[in-house]
Image (cartoon, grey):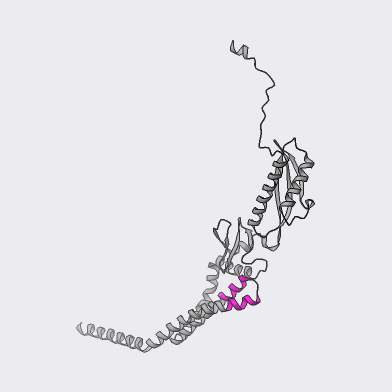
Amino acid sequence: MKNQFSEALDNLYNKLEVWFNTIIEYLPNFGLAILVVIASYIAAKHINKLTFRLVSKHVSQDSVSKMVSRLSAIVIVLLGLFLSLGILNLSKTLTSLLATAGVAGLAIGLALQNTLSNTVAGIVLSFRKKIQIGNWVETNGFSGEILDINLKNFVLKEADNKVVILPNKAILENPLKNYALTKTMRIHITCGVGYESDLEHVKALTQKAISNAFNGVETADDVEFYYTEFADSSINYVCRFWIEAINMKDKLAAQSKAMMAIKAAYDKAGINIPFPIRTLEFNNQLNLKQANK
């Protein structure tokens, strides 16, 4: 029993000694492999910046430049990992890992369908000329400025400074309204005037007020004006005109400016913008004397 225990203990010491010698032998290679990984990471950061600058000189889309620079950085990091494994004499292990990855690729692809579809959608969106970083867009119930288009998400910043992160797949599969594709935008103003108003005078005054308020509206005839309905308390109308605008802020500013101009013109001309009124009419008069008796 003692001989077996001593033999087992000797085997353990021998294995530990072999492992220790192996560690000492490969310690320089291990240190060199770590340096290669660190160097590849640092190089990837510089390659990312350099590639972005070079691509930006030839491509106007920032999304494409960011996508290419990120992919180049990923390639540099992978090369560093492969070199470090080669330094550690793990090339055979690397070959077996790549073979295993090829076999498992199908299973992983099926399990990560949504992630892969977002990645492909991100690449497609990055190369679309009509969708660029900085554009003001409206999609999936959100409206804001495009901050970033990466391999996973589509990032928007709304007017209230909130950041919305959407999956690329949702952007590619749903309608997207891009306000930056055109330099002009049509403004709609709805209002109502009292039934006692001279409708021809109201129309001319409204068109003149808007044309005077906006430099882009050259004449009063450029303002479209249409009466729409006989409402409960007013005769309602809608007027439309074009301005130079590429985002919702410009649109809201134009609407506010037009409303102030119309209100000032109506106040000066004595035109009434009525608030909702209810008139109660009693056809049968009450006999108060009989009620008192």
- Residue at 70% from the left image edge and 61% from the top image edge: 183
Quarter containing the C terminus? top right
Residue 237, located in which quarter of the rendered image?
Answer: top right
> Magenta: predominant secondary structure element?
helix
- Tell me where residue 75 appears, x and y as whole percent: 54, 79
Q: Residue furthest top?
A: 293
The question of residue 57 being in magenta is answered with yes
Which region of the structure is painted magenta?
51-69
Task: Determine whether 156 is above or below 271 in the image.
Answer: below
Residue 194, located in which quarter of the rendered image?
Answer: top right
- Residue at 23% from the left image edge and 84% from the top image edge: 4
The question of residue 163 being in magenta is answered with no
Q: Nearer the viewer, residue 43 or 206?
A: 206
Q: Is residue 225 visible?
A: yes
Residue 109 located left or right of residue 86? right
Q: Nearer the viewer, residue 25 or 177?
A: 177
- Tell me where residue 101 appears, x and y as whole percent: 51, 77
- Tell me where residue 26 appears, x and y as whole percent: 38, 87
